[in-house]
Image (cartoon, rainbow, N blue to C red):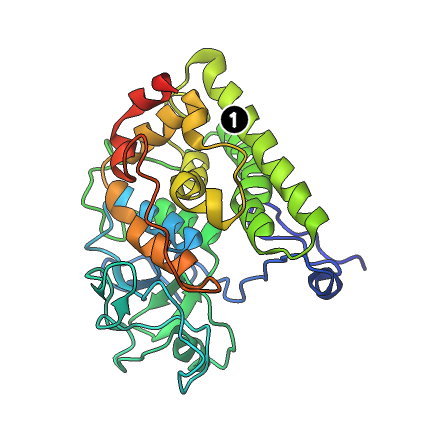
Amino acid sequence: MPEPTADLSTEENQADAADRRAQGEFVRGVSGFRSAIGDADFPAEPGRYHLFVALNCPWCHRVTLTRNVLGLQSGVSMDVAFPGRTEKDDPAGENLWEFNPERVASLTGGPLPECTDETATGEGLRLVKQIYAAEGSDERSVPVLYDKKQKRIVNNESAEIIRMLNAHAGALGSTIEQETRPDLYPDDADLQAEIDALNETIYTRINNGAYKAGFSSDQSVYAAAYEGYFTLLAKLEDRLGADGRPFLTGDRFTEADLRLFPTLYRHDPVYFVRMKLNGARILDYPNLWRWLCRVHALPGVAGSSSLIHCRQGYFGRSWNNVVPLGPFRPMPYPQAYAHPELAERQ
């Protein structure tokens, strides 16, 4: 029988992954925990579920965005890892997510106030790896959706976590009334098909495309990812400008907007340099810039991530661990996201 086809809006095709990695291509792995809130073992209840995240991680950013815009801050608890992984001299090994609120960030010279201890397992674990190890897994990624009642991992695929949070927002304890709470994936077959199509191309060419450009060691792989990234940015710019729509599918903010936002939020201050995506800034695309500012202004969005964590996480892992301080023109970020008119000055 042929192997099942990957959902390219959720994960990368794994065909010949080992050979592709050996030749210098960045190939993202597949998440192993795929249960869902609403399954028999995981009923939707307020206060039962917990998120383990890192604020520099764009896949976690999808989840923190969803939690915030749906008013789930009190219904779904959360721990935040330090944005830099463990170093070579760590007794547990290097490149591991850790909960260490006392760790000093080189960018600020002090601890980062958003970072927390681990509070969900009852064990006060230091490493995300230990949460997986308790279930016999050698995975180590974030985000993780965790059931505090059963002490079990529910899911570690961000695309699925955001959809289940949206589907069960009321039962999970949203503080926003249903009439005014955003529905990120409305029960409309045509709109869902449009969202799904956008998700696939945005994931492949922008979300994961940024990583393929930044972390592949083969020039041709980088060049293809670079071209695909900016080609799609141009198409999205035209899509927004054709009829002046405020969001990707029209008048309402949906999952497609939410999944695009983390990458574009990082582009000018981080990815332009770190991911070698220096063809243009989002500020150079007037419609996309206004869209970015519009989404950033939505309730809960600005507090869903931190550019300090992003800069520390991406550049703190570079060869010399020095974190760039800019850009400061036309003004520092994220303050620039409060100024949609900046696009008109370019």
Please state, as top left, top right, bottom left or bottom right, where the N terminus lies in the image: bottom right
Please state, as top left, top right, bottom left or bottom right, where the C terminus lies in the image: top left
Horizontal and vertical percent for residue 262? 41, 44
Q: Nearer the viewer, residue 323 or 15?
A: 323
Among all residues in the image, which is located at the extreme bottom?
91
Q: Residues within 10 Å of mark 1 (few under 14, many from 20)?
A: some
Residue at horizontal 27%, vertical 53%? 172
Q: Is residue 130 above or below residue 321?
A: below
198 sits to left or right of 291? right
Which structural element holds mark 1?
Answer: helix
Among all residues in the image, which is located at the extreme right?
1
Q: Is residue 28 above or below residue 137?
A: above
Horizontal and vertical percent for residue 133? 45, 81
Q: Nearer the viewer, residue 244 or 217?
A: 217
Residue at horizontal 30%, vertical 24%? 340
Q: Is residue 149 above or below residue 92?
A: above
305 sits to left or right of 39? left
Residue at horizontal 40%, vertical 61%? 143
Horizontal and vertical percent for residue 210? 54, 46
Q: Can residue 290 be seen at all in this image of the molecule?
A: yes
Residue at horizontal 69%, vertical 59%? 24
Q: Can residue 70 be seen at all in this image of the molecule?
A: no
Horizontal and vertical percent for residue 188? 47, 29
User: To which residue does mark 1 refer?
Assistant: 236
Disc 1 residue type (three-letter):
Leu
Q: Nearer the viewer, residue 85 or 320?
A: 320
